[in-house]
Structure formats: C-alpha cells, structure tokens
Image: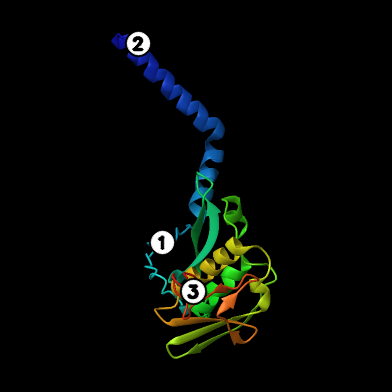
Amino acid sequence: MSNFSKIVIIILLVLSFLFIKEKYGDEIFNFIAQLRALPKVEIPEIKKTETVEIPEEIPTEEATTLINKEKVSVYFLALDSNDNGIYKKVTRDVIAGEDKFDFAIKELLKGPNLVEKSLGAYSEIPKNTKLLGIKHKGNKIIIDLNSDFQYGGGTDSIYSRMMQLIETAINNSDNKKIYLYLDGEQVNFIGGEGIMITQPLNEKSLEI
C-alpha cells in the first residue's frame, strides 16, 4: 500500500470519528456515565468441597447370622443314569434360632422342594408322617414319629425311607446316639413284614 493510500485512510477514519462524535457524542457520554454509576457485583468465593470418608458398615448381629448360616445335609432318593436307586444329598440353610438336628429332620419330612424334584429327587417317607417330637437327652437323641411312617409301600420302600432317616440323622447329630420311636415307643421292628431295626440308629441298623 502506498503512502498516499495510507494518508487517505487516516483522513477517512478521522472524519468518521468527528461525524460520530458530532451526531452521537452526547448519547455515548450518557451511556458511559450510566455504566460508571452501576453498583459493583461481588462474585461469591467458591469454597472447595470437602471429602468425607464414609466408614465401612459394621455388620449387625442379624446380618452376621445371615452371612454365617449353618448348613445341614438332608437325604432323598433319585435314579442314576442306569435307573438304579441312589441316595441324593441336598443341603439346607438352617433358620436362625433353630437346632441343627431338629431342622434337618423337619426338612426331611417336608420332602424335596420344586427345584430338587425337577432334578429327579423324591422321598419314600409317607406324606402323612408327622413329627411328634425330638428329645435331646445328653448324648442321646430320640426322634418320635407317628405310626404312619411305617405304613404304605413294600419292603424296599420301608428300607429306603429308613435309610433316608438314618443318613439324615447321623450326618447332623455330632456323633450322638439316635433312637427312633413311633407313637412314643421305641421300635425294634417296622412295617407289615416286620423289618428288624437295631438301635441306636446307624448305617447297619437294618442288616440281619
């Protein structure tokens, strides 16, 4: 750009400034005065957020009970791949406050649940068998059932239900001596064919 052109541009800018000042000078002055009269706005100081450490939750007694649930073994029946009868062990979580042995026997009498049934588990213990009581006497435990326990089915069925009871009892008894009573009396023979039982109960109680 030549010096002449620069001079022309400068003259134009000066004339423009003089024109604006002449026409809008008072308005610009008043606007600036108004801006100066505005009150100052104080921006509040932003405080740093404090980090609070949350302590780990201390387990309550109830939560500890649920976490440390004791398990029992309950024995039902099933068929293997060759359709041979086998004893099927399932586990149950003991309800808080329940005796381990008592709970296992009660669960045995209830029979397998829906999931276990879907997997082939079943029981030979008659549905109308009732628990009349369980007595703990030192190193001795007495299971008292109603007499319906011995009725229905043949010898094989009675043998199977007795072994269900025996396996469930001895695996949850902490090596105590277990006796079977029916209607309040100790039994030495069971079923219509009179299967002999040796007591206290063990895995050889039905052997002749």
Could you tell me how far apart the alpha carbons at marks 2 and 3 are, in whole angstroms? 115 Å
Q: Is residue 112 visible?
A: no
Identify the mark nearer the N-term, 3 or 1: 1
Q: Which mark is nearer the camera, 3 or 1?
A: 3
Give the secondary structure at mark 3: helix
Q: Which residue shows up at 48% across the image and 78% down it?
A: 198
In-front residue for pair 88/157: 157
Q: Amino acid at mark 2?
A: Ser
Along the horizontal axis of the image, is 190 left or right of 81?
right
Question: Is there CB contact under 8 Å for labels 3 and 1?
Answer: no
Q: Is residue 102 above or below residue 156?
A: below
Residue lying farthest right?
128
Q: Amino acid at mark 3?
A: Ala
Please state the horizontal and vertical placement of residue 63, each as a whole percent of the image.
47, 73
Identify the mark nearer the N-term, 1 or 2: 2
In-front residue for pair 85/74: 85
Q: Is residue 110 above or below residue 102?
A: above
Q: Is residue 178 visible?
A: yes
Estimate how packed mark 3 is, as few (under 14), some (14 to 19) or many (20 or more) residues with alpha carbons within 10 Å.
many
Please state the horizontal and vertical placement of residue 27, each as a whole percent of the image.
56, 39
Q: Amino acid at mark 1?
A: Glu
Give me the disc on residue 5: 2
Could you tell me how far apart the alpha carbons at marks 1 and 2 are, in whole angstroms? 53 Å
In-front residue for pair 67/102: 102
Q: Which residue shows up at 50% across the image and 58% down it?
A: 88
Give me the disc on residue 45: 1
Residue lying farthest left?
3
Residue placed under numbered mark 3 in the picture: 169
Q: Which residue shows up at 47% across the image and 73% down it?
A: 205
